[in-house]
Amino acid sequence: MSAERKFFVGGNFKMNGNLESLTAIADRLNSSELDANVEVVIAPPACYLASLSSQLAQKENVNVSAENVHQAAKGAFTGEISCSMALDCGASYAILGHSERRHVFGETNKQIGEKTKATLAAGLVVIACIGEKGEDRKSGNTMVVCVEQLTAYKDNVEDWSKVVIAYEPVWAIGTGEVATPEIAQETHLNIRSWLSDNVSPEVAASVRIIYGGSVNGKNCKELASQPDIDGFLVGGASLKPEFVDIINCDC
Ligand code: PEP
């Protein structure tokens, strides 16, 4: 965590919940005292974006994100939503390149790059996910994979103030196997150094790099104490009351 970069906590609900349970989560956020120095973003399934964004409209510092968007403005893409549809539903962010999009739905770096361009052009902030598989880390290729993914974003970003990088090692997502603070910090620092060398030192100093992968109410404080960890992207725990504890972990 750094004084210059606003701490960011995102909740990725994935394909979980229903109108009743997700409304209850928004109610909890509305009625909880949240650290005013933290930017909070929740990403519900697309069909609940509009109702949750209107429910949270008056809550300062809490915004809504699409879990994914398509790069085309419109057309014959059954089951997809466009950036303007996400905006219409109250979203101001979009998660791109999540490991499930990459490894379950086969999205490529090229496609994620195209989505990045379209999403930024539409005026949404991109939560740009990257991360290596367990086998990549074991073979010493963590940064090789992360740099390929970062390059696809870089080729499509002009204004880095509209990007939050989410480092999410695939082996830590939904597994309960959180990266140690040392491993996460080391990789965040490597990502920041890459940004400094390949984008600019100013961007490297200002872009938020958040960590995702089995973050919960117990492990968040120590992770947040690392100098290059600027927040979290939270999956499973964002559906639970402890999400508020994660948001407030630095209070
Ligand atoms: C995620 O899906 O982005 C994620 C980090 O999931 P979890 O917190 O459940 O590991």
Image (cartoon, rainbow, N blue to C red):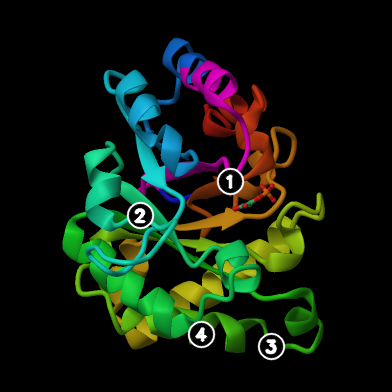
Q: Are marks 2 and 3 in contact (CB under 8 Å)?
A: no
Residue 235 location, quadrant: top right
User: Mark 2 vs ligand 1: CB under 8 Å?
Assistant: no
Q: CA distance from mark 2 to mark 3?
A: 34 Å
Q: CA distance from mark 1 to mark 3?
A: 28 Å
Q: Secondary structure at mark 2?
A: loop
Q: Which residue is mark 1?
A: 14
Q: Nearer the viewer, mark 2 or mark 1?
A: 2
Name which of mark 4 and mark 3 comes first in the sequence: 3
Q: CA distance from mark 4 to mark 3?
A: 10 Å
Q: Which residue is mark 4?
A: 147
| Left or right of 158, for residue 164 | right
Q: Are marks 4 and 3 in contact (CB under 8 Å)?
A: no
Name which of mark 1 and mark 3 comes first in the sequence: 1
Q: Secondary structure at mark 1?
A: loop
Name, please, the residue furthest toward the top.
31
Q: Which residues are magenta?
A: 3-26
Residue drawn at x 71%, y 62% as measured from the top left: 182
Query: Label 1 neighbourhood size at 10 Å, few (<14), some (14-19), many (20+)?
Result: some
Q: CA distance from mark 2 to mark 4?
A: 28 Å
Q: Secondary structure at mark 3?
A: loop
* Residue 141, disc: 3
Q: Are marks 2 and 1 in contact (CB under 8 Å)?
A: no
